[in-house]
Image (cartoon, rainbow, N blue to C red):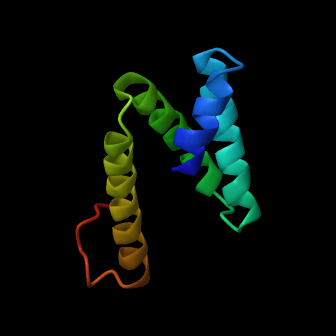
Amino acid sequence: LFFICTTFTLLRQHFPDWLANILQAVIFSSFLWEIGYKAWGPLLTFPFALLQGYTFKLTKSFTYVVSVHLLFDLVLFLALVHAHNRDWLPIFLY
């Protein structure tokens, strides 16, 4: 959320909103790549960061962005648990 609310806000002072949003998404995805979020992770993270920046721009609400982020984290957590033990959470279709 640092990237969405701080980096995006600082970049908006120097660039148009659309460019600031793209730049914060690149920085956010690059940061996660460096700490080990490899493979298909950045392909999912980049659009998610764009969505959060856009949501913050529209609502100007940190609470709303936190809610969207936590909902995404919940789905990701459930997918990881399901991937390791498919019998525990049989909620995903495939």
Q: Residue 30 at what x, y percent from top left?
A: 73, 50
Q: Residue 27 at what x, y percent from top left?
A: 71, 44
Q: Residue 35 at what x, y percent from top left?
A: 71, 67
Q: Which quadrant holds residue 4?
A: top right
The one nearer the camera, 83 or 25, is 25
Q: Which quadrant holds residue 60?
A: top left
On the picture, is 89 further left or further right than 94? Answer: left
Q: Which quadrant holds residue 24?
A: top right
On the picture, is 28 further left or further right than 77? Answer: right
Task: Give the number of marks.
Answer: 0
Residue found 62% across the figure and 56% down from its top:
40
The one nearer the camera, 84 or 68, is 68
91 is higher (above) or lower (below) than 23: below
Q: Residue 48 at what x, y percent from top left?
A: 50, 42
On the picture, is 62 further left or further right than 28? Answer: left
Residue found 70% across the figure and 68% down from its top:
36
Q: Give the position of the C terminus as an image quadrant.
A: bottom left
Q: Residue furthest right?
A: 34
73 is higher (above) or lower (below) than 90: above
11 is higher (above) or lower (below) than 86: above
Residue found 39% across the figure and 69% down from its top:
77
On the picture, is 62 further left or further right than 21? Answer: left
